[in-house]
Each structure stands twice: as C-alpha cells, then as structure tokens.
Amino acid sequence: MLLFAVITFNFLTQTLQKEFDDALYNYAVDVLDGIALSPRGSLTFEESQLDRQKIYPFSLGTALIQITNRQGLVASQLGDFGAFALPLDRKAFQLEQDGEVSYLTIYDVSGLISKEAETYRMISFPIDNTPIPQLILQVAAPMTLLENQLQNRKLAFQFGIPMVLLIATIAGLFLSDRALAPIRKMIDQAGNISVDALSNRLPIPPVKDEIRDLSVTLNSMLDRIQKAFESQERFVADASHQLLTPLAVMKGQIERSISENPQGSEIFKGLLQEVDHLSRLVQDMLVLARIDAGRDSLHLQEVALDEVIFEALRRVEKLRAESEKRIQVQLSESLKQSAIFWGDMDLLVHLVFNLLENALKYSKGTEAIRLQLQQTEKYLELSVENPSDWIAEEDLATIFERFHRGSATAHRQRGFGLGLSIVQKIAQVHGGEMSVLNSTREDGLQVVVFQLKLPISVA
C-alpha cells in the first residue's frame, strides 16, 4: 500500500505539473502576441491581448511578466513585482525560438508584494529570431491551485490508506473468523473422538468447498476405523468367551482324574495349574474387551468404595492364605456417607483384586500389605503399599502397558502382564488416575505404592 501510494502520488504530481505547464505555455504565447515596440524603441504589453476567454489554473492578474536581455537587465515588466525580480534562466538563451521553452520552479519569493503562493512556476523562451537569442520572455504564475490539489491528494492518501487498511483488517478478521469456524469445530469435535466415543463424527460444513470434502473424507476414514476396531473387539470377546467353556471342561476332567487316581496326581496338578492360568488369561481378555467397548458397556450404579474393598478381600482370601501374608485395611475417618461414586461394581472389585493380587505375589518379608482409603474434597483416594524391592526406573514408565513384566521380577512369578494394564484401563474408564511410586515407610521399610484417584459424584 505504501509503495502504491508513493507511485500514485508521484504520477499525479507529474500529471498535474504537466497540465499546469501546458496552461502556462498557452498563456505565455498569448502574452507574446501582445508584445509591441513603442515609438521610443521600448517593448510594451498590450492589455487587450491578455484578456482572453480561457481557463487557466491561476488568475490572470496574479501572473508576473518580464522581458530580460542576455546581460540580465530587465527590459520591461508587467505585474506588481515590488523588490522582487524573476531569476534569469540561462538555459533559455541556448534555445531556438521554434517553440522551445524552459521551466523553472521558484521557491524563494521574498520581496514580492501580495504573493499568491509560496512557489511560482516560470516559463522562459526567446523572443527574437536571431541564431543567438538576445531577449527572453519570462512569465511566472502562482501555483496555488496546483499546491491545493497536491495537498488534497496527500491528505486523501494520509487518511485514506490507514482507513482502507483498518477496514481491510476488520473485514479480514471477520471473514477469516467465519472461514475458519468450520475448522475450529472440526478440531473441537476431533478432540472428543476416542476409544470411548468412536461413533462421534466431524461436523460437515454446509458450503461445498475443500473443507467440506476434508470433513467427509475424515468421517469416511473414521467409519472404517470404527468398523475395524469393533470387529477386533468382537473377535477378542467371542474368542475369549468360546475358550472359557473348553477350559472349564478340561478343569473338571482333571479334577476328577486327580480324585480317581491319587498316584498320578502330581501330573494332573501341573495340568490343572496351567488350565487355571489359561482361564485367568481368558477372563482378563474378556474384561479388557468390555472396557475397550467404552462407558456404554458399563453397568453404572451408586458404589461405595469400602464395599468394593471388602468384596475384593473376600475374593483374594484364598491367595492370601496360601501366601501366609497379612493385609492391613485402613479406612479414613474423612469418608462421608453422602459422597458416593458412580461406577461399575464388578470392574472396580476387579481393580482392587488385581492390586492386592499383585501385592501378594511380589511382596517380601512378613510385613503387612497396607490398603488405605481416604476422601478429599474432590476425590476418593485408594493406595496399596507393597513391601518389596523398588521398581526399576525404566519399568515405572511402562508398568501399566499390556503384557509388560518387570525385568527384575519376571522370573519370580508367573503371569501374563495384563493385571496392571486392566487396573489402569478400569481407572481411566471411570475418569480416575492410576500412579505408582517407590517410597519408604516411617520405619525405613522400602515399599512400592500404587495409588488410585477417583472423582467423587454426589447423588
């Protein structure tokens, strides 16, 4: 815009200057026709020749007319000069008379009586027909009209360009805001699409443009992803469900064989243990398939977390008795009857059961496993302290991944690495958070602490 303004203003200045010079030339020609030689031999101007019905960019009475010889002496003047004299333009004496002229802008008009403008434009050309001109006609006219025109155009640029830029900026912001609104809606909706909400789709703008094509294409891709994901979920759930029946049959037959043939019971006990491991793996896969299906597959109800703990303790009692370890339960006095949790009872019991089972498997010594439940203003916090060697730093970041088993403990206990992954998935589907850290009890005992935070909902 600035470059455009400079170029345009210079072009307008040159155009107006050319028009002014042309008018000044026409006026000077009329003046030249009115020059006469008096009987005494002096040059005079005939007033009647100056009064023509022509339009000039200056008043006729304000023009200054002067005839000068080569020595710079003034031969004749017409106009109110006062102490002012037109400067001699030496270039005019180098011109021939055939219409050749020279122009000069006069910026210093001090001494001029009743000056009409701050600058005057002067035209000079030879009068005589001699090869070397001896007399020069000089006509100077005030540039009032030209100055006003240039000043008006300058003001138009000074105020017009910022105004245009301001309007363009406001209009640009408004139009860009409207143009980008569909993209912002797509971004917001895309952020809501997750495993729990695969059915959500991006909004389709009403205008048929590239953004609409992009939205339609992405929705088509999401349709394919959802179908593939649901197909995988159905396969895992169906396969796991179908595996439970033959495993249950195998377990029953092995148990019957043990009772009928005590002598070979060791072999059958090994087989029974493997069947139990396979059954647990299949059950974990079913739980994961159910969790991956999202909150719509949950049986949500009002749940008291202390009841969840007692049910998990009942289920883990057999494993605790076999390990001959103790579980110490601490329920904080901050628990309130009015604050309840809205969740799936079976999945929450499964979560606490997995934490306790993990603690029983990997705890060492005779120190009790601590299970604590307390309530803050916004959360229910459950923690399980496992007296054990600290988990390696490289395992802390990946301990909740599926089929992950710590390198330091993988050889000590059998497992499939799904228990803690299920714990985290259950916490996430209920809007909670799971974390694990290495800590030290007040008595100096090293413990591994698993912490669960669940947001409180009030009935």
Image: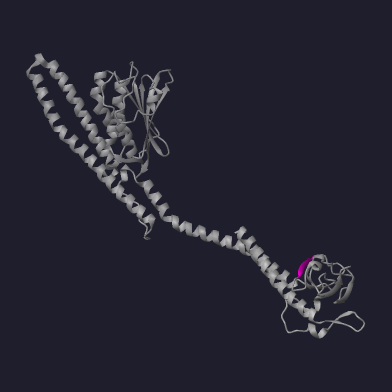
Q: Measured from the top left, where is residue 341 in percent x and y?
A: 33, 40
Residue at x 29% of width, y 18% of height: 411
Quarter of the image where one finds residue 85:
bottom right
Question: Does residue 344 appear left or right of residue 272 in this picture?
Answer: right
Q: Farthest residue to the top: give it.
A: 263
Residue at (24, 33) in percent of width and height:
285
Query: Is residue 105 inside the magenta stretch?
Result: yes
Residue 368 versus residue 155: which sits nearer the camera? 155
Rendered view: 365 above or below 221: above
Q: In x, y percent, where is residue 72?
A: 88, 68
**In-front residue for pair 336/78:** 78
Q: Position of residue 131 (x, y in %)?
A: 81, 71
Nearer to me, 11 or 274:
11
Residue 13, image quadrant: bottom right
Quadrant assignment, res 252: top left
Q: x, y (%) of residue 79?
A: 85, 77
Colour logic: one colour
Residue 158 within the magenta-colored segment of the rendering: no
Q: Which residues are magenta?
A: 101-106
Work out whether 111 lies above or below 352: below
The quadrant of the image that shows the N terminus is: bottom right
- Residue 270 versus residue 88 in the image, above or below: above
Name above or below for residue 451 compared with residue 177: above
Q: Quadrant of the C terminus?
A: top left
Q: Is residue 271 left or right of residue 51?
A: left
